[in-house]
Image (cartoon, helix red, strand yellow):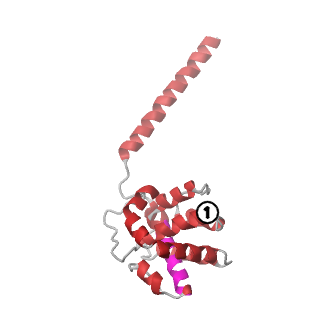
């Protein structure tokens, strides 16, 4: 069963062990898709290398570091903020929100449910030790990615409002550095002759 919008914390408290595992996998999958920057920040904090912000690469990095309890704890926290009490809407959703800002917004919720967060971290750690975990998590990420049958991962990961002024600044800086480099090269060549 796909749990799209639900009260994750309430369900986690009342579910059986196997249902808790399924819920955690689904919530992690959604977190990788909805909060790629925050997930990558966790990997950076925990010194876990990853290839890109694509959900596939974030998933692989987490799977490859299944013994990192600090990382698991933080990923679980992000995961529960996706459907914290069934009232989450994606209006003005920012996929590039940082881990720090996400934790500020969800700090009250996380403090109120610290026992559940601890239990979920331990359940996730134990689940990650299972051989089939990697296959199940990867399949879940793909299921959520293709839930509507239309979106590709690159569409899902891209922020809704690209900051063009930042791109212009970077381009201008590259042009200035190129001109300086070219000028230095020409000067060196002329001086050498």
Residue depicted at 42% across the width and 76% down the height = 148
Residue reaching furthest to the left: 91
Q: Which residues are magenta?
A: 18-32
Residue depicted at 46% across the width and 87% down the height = 14
Q: Which one is nearer the viewer's eye here, 176 or 32?
A: 32
> Does the image show residue 90?
yes
Q: Which one is nearer the viewer's eye here, 60 or 62?
A: 62
Residue reaching furthest to the right: 131
Q: Which one is nearer the viewer's eye here, 70 or 146?
A: 70
Q: Which one is nearer the viewer's eye here, 141 or 5?
A: 5
Q: Is residue 129 above or below residue 177?
A: below
The x, y position of residue 88, in whole percent, is 35, 72
Q: Is residue 20 above or below residue 150?
A: below
The x, y position of residue 93, in whole percent, is 35, 63
Q: Is residue 14 above or below residue 68?
A: below
- Residue placed under numbered mark 1 in the picture: 61
Q: Is residue 22 magenta?
A: yes
Image quarter where the C terminus lies is top right
Disc 1 element: helix
Q: Is residue 159 left or right of residue 186?
A: left
> Does the image show residue 98?
no
Residue depicted at 43% across the width and 72% down the height = 150
Q: Residues within 10 Å of mark 1 (few under 14, many from 20)?
A: some
The x, y position of residue 153, in whole percent, is 49, 65
The x, y position of residue 177, in whole percent, is 50, 30
Magenta: main secondary structure equals: helix
Q: Quadrant of residue 106?
A: bottom left
Q: Is residue 109 magenta?
A: no
Residue depicted at 56% across the width and 54% down the height = 44
């Amino acid at each position: 069963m796909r749990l799209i919008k639900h009260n994750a914390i309430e369900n986690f408290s009342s579910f059986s062990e196997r249902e808790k595992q399924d819920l955690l996998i689904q919530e992690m999958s959604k977190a990788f898709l909805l909060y790629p920057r925050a997930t990558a920040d966790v990997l950076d904090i925990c010194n876990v290398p990853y290839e890109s912000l694509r959900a596939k690469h974030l998933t692989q990095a987490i799977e490859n570091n299944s013994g990192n309890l600090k990382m698991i704890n933080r990923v679980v926290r992000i995961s529960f903020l996706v459907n914290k009490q069934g009232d989450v809407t994606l209006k003005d959703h920012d996929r590039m929100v940082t881990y720090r800002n996400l934790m500020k917004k969800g700090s009250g919720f996380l403090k109120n449910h610290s026992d559940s967060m601890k239990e979920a971290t331990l359940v996730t750690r134990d689940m990650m030790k299972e051989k089939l975990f990697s296959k199940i998590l990867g399949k879940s990420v793909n299921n959520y990615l293709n839930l509507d049958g239309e979106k590709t991962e690159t569409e899902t990961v891209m922020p809704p409002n690209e900051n063009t002024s930042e791109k212009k600044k970077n381009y201008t800086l590259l042009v200035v550095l190129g001109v300086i480099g070219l000028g230095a090269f020409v000067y060196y060549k002329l001086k050498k002759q």
